[in-house]
């Protein structure tokens, strides 16, 4: 059974997920659900052997697991995410310089992935952009918070994302494509 959001405190887990292809494999499993190695290879444009290697790394970190109940025969291997999401706090890695470096690399990889997805959208063909019309958006805003208020804001934002992300999709014949959303709330100066 898939666990809820996992709190990561082990730098080895962050190191395992801090690879562009492994992050992408986790994204594919999150969006499309359990898949075979060949399906993951097709969706990512990678060789089956390469995908298999990276899945083993993710499995060793308990980020993905085999889903044998989905196999049609003994040769077919399905994979699924173990948790619905991952979280970590920089404070959990501050005591050890090596762990702190891994944590910073994980944050950097996440930001690169997030910004890359937005850039890919803006570089997509006119036909794809026209299909979504004016629906895609970006927003930013300067807010004033105490640290506790920022935590409260984050909690409310996660509740909104859960309401939309965890809902049962209506069976109304409408196509619902994957939409990537990200937001940061960090102390900054204009």
Image (cartoon, rainbow, N blue to C red):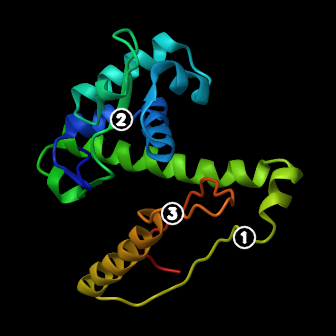
How crowded pointer 3 is (Cα within 10 Å; few <14, some 14-19, many 20+) is rated as few
Q: Residue at x 55, y 64 (%)?
A: 170
Q: CA distance from mark 2 to mark 1?
A: 30 Å
- The image position of residue 91, as x and y in percent, is 18, 59
Q: Are marks 2 and 3 in contact (CB under 8 Å)?
A: no
Residue under label 1: 135
Q: Earlier in the sequence, mark 2 or mark 3?
A: 2
Q: Are marks 1 and 3 in contact (CB under 8 Å)?
A: no
How crowded pointer 1 is (Cα within 10 Å; few <14, some 14-19, many 20+) is rated as few
Under tag 1, what secondary structure?
loop
- The image position of residue 176, as x and y in percent, is 64, 58
Residue 131 picture quarter: bottom right
How crowded pointer 2 is (Cα within 10 Å; few <14, some 14-19, many 20+) is rated as many
Closer to the camera: disc 1 or disc 3? 1
* Residue 138 appears left or right of 126: left
Under tag 2, what secondary structure?
strand
Q: Which mark is residue 80?
A: 2
Q: Residue furthest right?
A: 126
Q: Earlier in the sequence, mark 2 or mark 1?
A: 2
């Amino acid at each position: 059974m898939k666990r809820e959001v996992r709190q990561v405190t082990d730098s080895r887990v962050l190191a395992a997920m801090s690879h562009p292809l492994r992050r992408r494999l986790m994204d594919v499993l999150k969006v499309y659900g359990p898949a075979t190695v060949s399906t993951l290879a097709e969706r990512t444009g990678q060789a089956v052997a390469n995908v298999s290697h990276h899945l083993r790394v993710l499995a060793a970190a308990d980020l993905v697991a085999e889903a044998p109940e989905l196999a049609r025969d003994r040769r077919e291997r399905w994979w699924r995410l173990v948790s619905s999401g991952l979280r970590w706090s920089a404070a959990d890695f501050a005591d050890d310089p090596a762990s702190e470096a891994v944590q910073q690399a994980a944050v950097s990889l996440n930001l690169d992935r997030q910004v890359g997805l937005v850039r890919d959208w803006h570089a997509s063909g006119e036909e794809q952009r026209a299909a979504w019309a004016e629906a895609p958006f970006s927003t930013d805003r300067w807010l004033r918070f105490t640290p506790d208020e920022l935590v409260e804001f984050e909690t409310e934002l996660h509740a909104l994302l859960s309401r939309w992300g965890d809902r049962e999709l209506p069976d109304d014949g409408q196509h619902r494509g994957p939409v990537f959303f990200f937001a940061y709330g960090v102390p900054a100066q204009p």
